[in-house]
Image (spheres, rainbow, N blue to C red):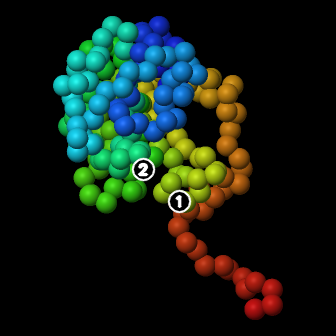
Amino acid sequence: MAAALERDAGDEVLLTDPVYPYYPGKTRMLGGDATFVPANRDGSLDVDAYREAMGDETGLVVLNTPNNPTGAVYDHAKVATIVRLCEEHDAVAVVDEVYDHFDLSGTFESALTIDSEHCVVTSGFSKSLAITGFRVGYAIFPEWLAENAKARHMLVNVATTRPGQYAVLRGLEGPTRPTTRPPGS
């Protein structure tokens, strides 16, 4: 979010309403102005509402799919259309996919399949591996934003914990059987 707002392309952040409270708070902390774009009654994205809300001051659009708190899985074509709108307005779309493993509809498709220099995709392992306190995640940035994002991350977050990284590695490797028997067995 910070890297997108530091580009002097506008301070407005478009957030789908309802929205996870972290995003408006983070927007305020970064000096941005949150504008809430209502979702359709069924929780789906209202592309026309985004088209209407975007302007010269829009620097960032945040989409969270599957959505927290509604669980709505956004239609991939609508996400792609909003990314294209971001291109037209020199805004950056950040697509948070941390709940991708909780899509019970089977319709989720990652924004990583959208070829755009205006799209950042974030995710993590805290939900899918049930290690919420470990806060291990990642972001895929367009090259032109990556250096700024890395510098900011290094100065603000430094790194996650070693036990958290190890837990993710073991989770990604899958279950294994011990090679030796525990003492007393």
- State which mark lies toward you, 2 or 1: 2
Q: Report whether 12 appears left or right of 77.
A: right
- List the residue tagged with mark 2: 99
Q: Can residue 118 be seen in this view?
A: yes
Residue nearest the observer in this picture, 142 or 19: 19
Residue 148, compared with residue 115, is above or below; it is above
Element under disc 2: loop
- Local crowd at mark 1 within 10 Å, few (<14), some, or many (≥20)? few
| Closer to the camera in the image, 62 or 153 | 62
Residue visible at 48% across and 57% down in the picture = 128
* Quadrant in which the C terminus is drawn: bottom right
> In the rendered structure, which disc, 2 or 1, sits on the residue that comes first in sequence?
2
* Secondary element at tag 1: loop
Give the residue pinned by disc 1. 129
The amino acid type of the residue labelled 1 equals Leu
Residue ID at (68%, 80%): 179
Residue 44 figure quarter: top left
The answer to whether 86 is drawn above or below residue 134 in the figure is above
Relative image position of residue 168 (x, y in whole percent): 59, 56
Callout 2 crowding tier (Cα within 10 Å): few <14, some 14–19, many ≥20 = many
Nearer-the-camera pick, 49 or 92: 49
Residue 119, image x, y percentages: 37, 28
Residue at 22% over, 20% down? 51
In percent of width and height, residue 149 lies at: 55, 25
User: In which image quadrant can residue 183 be found?
Assistant: bottom right
